[in-house]
Amino acid sequence: MTRTVLSSATRETIIGFDEPFVMIGERINPTGRKLLAAEMKVGDYSRVEADTLAQVAAGAQMLDVNAGIPLADEPKILAEVIQLVQSITDVPLCIDSSIIAALEAGLKVYQGKALVNSTTAEDEVMEQVLPLVKKYGAAVVAISNDDTGISEDPDERFEVAKKIVERAQDHGIKPCDVVVDPLVMPIGAINSAGRDVFHLIRRLRNELKVNTTCGASNIGFGLPNRHAINNAFLPMLAASGMTSAILNPMHEGLVPSIKAADVLTGVDRSCAYWIKTFREPVAEGEGRGGRRGRRRRA
Amino acid sequence: MTRTVLSSATRETIIGFDEPFVMIGERINPTGRKLLAAEMKVGDYSRVEADTLAQVAAGAQMLDVNAGIPLADEPKILAEVIQLVQSITDVPLCIDSSIIAALEAGLKVYQGKALVNSTTAEDEVMEQVLPLVKKYGAAVVAISNDDTGISEDPDERFEVAKKIVERAQDHGIKPCDVVVDPLVMPIGAINSAGRDVFHLIRRLRNELKVNTTCGASNIGFGLPNRHAINNAFLPMLAASGMTSAILNPMHEGLVPSIKAADVLTGVDRSCAYWIKTFREPVAEGEGRGGRRGRRRRA
């Protein structure tokens, strides 16, 4: 049973085959959020604070932190944001940047064991990211593309992921500290995108025995009623063996659908979390066996 | 690509590996519905009519018809109800009884190719049901239990299903006309019930190459917020390869979750059905590229 143990100074989150699905909040990311980008650039992190608290309240067990703002001092901003976020929540973080200096600046100030987002299978990228991951005792997201781009063949993407896991081992990083992102394409563009990813996740879990994650929100790009697509997609990913995803826990219906998937994959043992969360309150003046209460439960 | 072609006098519904998930409406069934049972017993089929129209309007591509009322003339009632239902809708039917005489009475009056619900792997049952299925050119639901009961081991249930498929072939019924019910246990009682059924469905599809169905509503028995469990369960079944289910299409959120699953498994080709159903109407006075319309779609 593969387990990737992430931590803050005081709390652990485990991504694992036998653990509840880990929701990594995606909101602290200026990409496509002009207002947030402008604020972060001048050191105004009030919206970052609000997004932190709201995502954790919604159920996120980890948060992704990205400070990719054009022409800004990304290493400085990323380090500041990480320190701020860690000062107001204890969930472990995913340090998200395509700039090596920013990843290192983030890792330097991070308290606990972080998840580094990400390396690809490109040699140049692996040889910069993996030593950092090892140096700071972190775990890493492995994106299954290489110098040739993203293959449409899921079995080729499997081989690319395998290459990263093997290279990580060369750097002293255990396979359980590599979380593979199989890459989710928009279903509106590629009709087999769902089937492909379900197949790939099963292979990654059964053969490579690694944890998996993905940016879950892209699947419905361009389609109407995207939330309904997402709310069905996450349980389907979980049924295929995926163990975490980067998503917006504030989207209506998404957290209950993931918690229902936890019940159905059996990781919510004895349905304890589900029953605690959704059992109906006993109306005043009624006993536990009260008729109305029982009927409504049926 | 396995296809089970069912029909009424004028319409086909195909349960198939490459077809939209088939929702078989479960409502025309007096089990646990005292009022309906009492009405059906005295030949009042007004509620049957209402349930027929409502389920088809909600999206059911087939309807299950059951007339199992204690101390009633089940063959007579079943035949009457089938004739009535066929007179007001053209969706194919699933003729549901544990009484052989009732199945035969139903098949006699049925127009088209019906799905007979069901046989188990018990010799006595198979030897009565399968000749009827062959005689009337029907298809059959195969429930994966035998004289020893229901095994908790999904691989044993696979062997039981295989036995029925083989026996059906002995009776001249092709494997594509056997739709296997892997049996869904309540997740509140058996923690591995979901995982077991996902595993079994994959084996039934990949190895035995048969279509599958199940009574989907049992999974959340005894749990609070059952509908949310069901709305996640159906996409998970579809991701595992299930091709139909007997369910209540009027449950809130269930049909959209199944239609989203059709998008994600790729059987809703080019997302055509989804886009047609959920695209936002263009507001009056706005062009297709109108700013508000575009922003709301983002």
Image: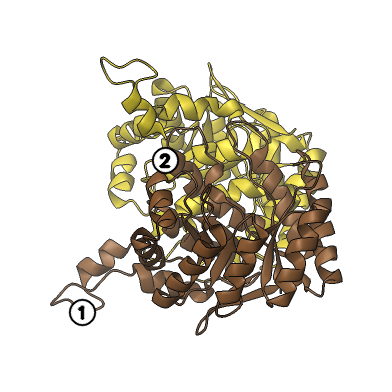
Chain colours: A yellow, B brown
Observer-nearest residue: B150 or B276?
Answer: B150
Spatial separation of the CA atoms under disc 1 and disc 2: 34 Å
Q: Is residue A73 left or right of residue A103?
A: left
Q: Chain of mark 1?
A: B
The relative height of residue A287 versus residue B248 in the rendered view (above or below) is above
Observer-nearest residue: A234 or A167?
Answer: A234
Label number found at residue A212: none
The relative height of residue B111 versus residue A149 in the rendered view (above or below) is below
Disc 2: CA contacts within 10 A as few (<14), some (14-19) or many (>=20): many
Q: Residue at x 66, y 45 (%)?
A: A241
Label number found at residue A249: 2
Q: Is residue A233 left or right of residue A177?
A: left
Q: Which residue is the site of mark 1? A: B287
Amino acid beneath label 2 = Pro
Q: Residue furthest bottom?
A: B10
Amino acid beneath label 1 = Gly
Q: Is residue B3 left or right of residue B153?
A: left
Marks 1, 2 in one chain: no
**Label 2 residue SS:** loop
Q: Position of residue B98 (x, y in %)?
A: 64, 54
